Amino acid sequence: MAEKLNAVKGMNDILPPESARWEWLEATVRELMARYAYRNVRTPILEHTALFVRGIGEVTDIVEKEMYSFHDRSDKYGDNDHLTLRPENTAGIVRAAIEHNMLYDGGKRLWAIGPMFRREKPQRGRFRQFHQIDVEALGFAGPDVDAELILLASGLWKAIGLTDVRLEINSLGQPAERAQHRAQLIAHFDAHADQLDEDARRRLHSNPLRILDTKNPAMKAVVESAPKLIDFLGAESLAHFEGLKAILDANDIAYTINPRLVRGLDYYNLSVFEFVTDRLGSQGTVCAGGRYDGLFEQLGGKPAPAVGWAIGVERVLELLKEQGTAVPVSTPDAYAVVPDAAAMPVALRTLQQLRDAGVRVQMHAATADGLGSFKSQFKKADASGAAHALVFGADELARGEVTVKALRDGSGAQTARPLAELPAWAATLQSPAPNN
Ligand code: ATP
Ligand code: MG
């Protein structure tokens, strides 16, 4: 036998029945986005490496060590490209907005879903290929849109029945305010250099704000006593923050202000927020977002305000599982029992008509051992979860009929249905679709 090949470490196959949970979540998200009037975008999974270096920042974990990048061979379509599998979606969406001049007639509300790639240590809630739901509100400056995004995430938790998340918010102010804070922060960490780990010492001058984000418990004290960015904010930044809080309060959205919630890059500003849970160990952030008014300029576009968030799909699904949330599973309405292969042409024509009429039907197919006995076909019909069996027996077909047998209501009732009158009885097979 040939050697078996496995999937790449940290990259998962999503298979039935698990995939039903994904389909259900995606359908819910699609419906929800329409309610908030966000429109779907799909950008390429491969982008120029430079996009992420500029759009995420050189001194971030992602760009420093997590990207899947390669040097594409040159051909007549492009020369010596450095390409990267997207580690997140914001940079690609902003690139597309600039490239297609999407903001020419005003702001845009966009959403996307798809796989992202980061070379991280695979563990619970952390994979090398994972999926994000992304929303980006482009061209809007006020705290009302920041609040709308938080309400949208809350709306999603409600729609899927997720209860175990809490909201943390903070304000990063504007670059000038952060520069003052940064100087004080470096002075503070310098004075306590003995309490810093290696990572923090390395970041002290490149990205000191990120030290606040440390997951190292030994640094708790030195981080908690550090100067707080919020104390450096001017009147305008504070008004934006107050505006956000007022809308959250009016909507009874509970939150805590976490002064250590940061993004380490200059084009992030004002509102930042995360939805977190204690139930997924140190992979507790299920949604992370914030304002990035400087990014359009950073990527060569006309300046435009923008705010967005990303949800980690695997973490949300894991959390739902932890909570014991059941998800509707799609089962066929009917299963075709075909005792003799000679009946297949009529059977398949009938199934096709039923499907055209909206009925979900599973056909019985032969294995290498043939179609199997009548009894074993009924076992399969039962296991499929179908509510009805359609029996295409020779006697029935000779009369131009099919027998419909109830499998789930306990009655075992059998009715002969004329094939010629199929449109009239097709609807009686249908049960409500689980996603509606
Ligand atoms: P973390 O601190 O957990 O590494 P992050 O700051 O790198 O998160 P973001 O870049 O803000 O995460 O991504 C948004 C969301 O995407 C995260 O809150 C998380 O839910 C999810 N996410 C990020 N990286 C992974 C991964 N490797 N596997 C699964 N989900 C991920
Ligand atoms: Mg990370």
Image (tube, rainbow, N blue to C red):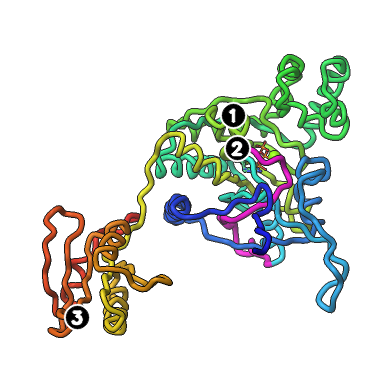
Q: Quadrant of the N terminus?
A: bottom right
Q: CA distance from mark 2 to mark 3?
A: 54 Å
Find out whether residue 2 is within the magenta segment: no
Query: Is 96 in front, or is 123?
Result: 123
Q: Which residue is mark 3?
A: 394
Cβ of mark 3 under 8 Å from ligand 1: the answer is no
Disc 2: CA contacts within 10 A as few (<14), some (14-19) or many (>=20):
few
Residue pictured at 31% horizontal, 84% vertical: 345
- Image quadrant where residue 219 sits: top right
Q: Earlier in the sequence, mark 1 or mark 2?
A: 2
In the image, residue 409 lies at what x, y percent?
16, 54
Q: CA distance from mark 1 to mark 2?
A: 8 Å
- Whether 390 is drawn above or below 52: the answer is below
Q: Which residue is mark 1?
A: 281
Question: Which corner quadrant of the figure contains ligand 2?
Answer: top right
Q: CA distance from mark 3 to mark 1?
A: 60 Å
Q: What amino acid type is highlighted by mark number 3?
A: Ala
Q: Which residues are magenta?
A: 100-125
In the image, residue 155 lies at what x, y percent?
44, 43
Q: Are marks 1 and 2 in contact (CB under 8 Å)?
A: yes
Q: 1 left or right of 319?
A: right
Query: Is 331 in front, or is 196?
Result: 331
Where disc 3 sits, the SS reads helix
Disc 3: CA contacts within 10 A as few (<14), some (14-19) or many (>=20):
some
Residue 124, label in figure: 2
Cβ of mark 1 under 8 Å from ligand 1: the answer is no
Main secondary structure found in the magenta portion: loop
Q: What amino acid type is highlighted by mark number 1?
A: Gly
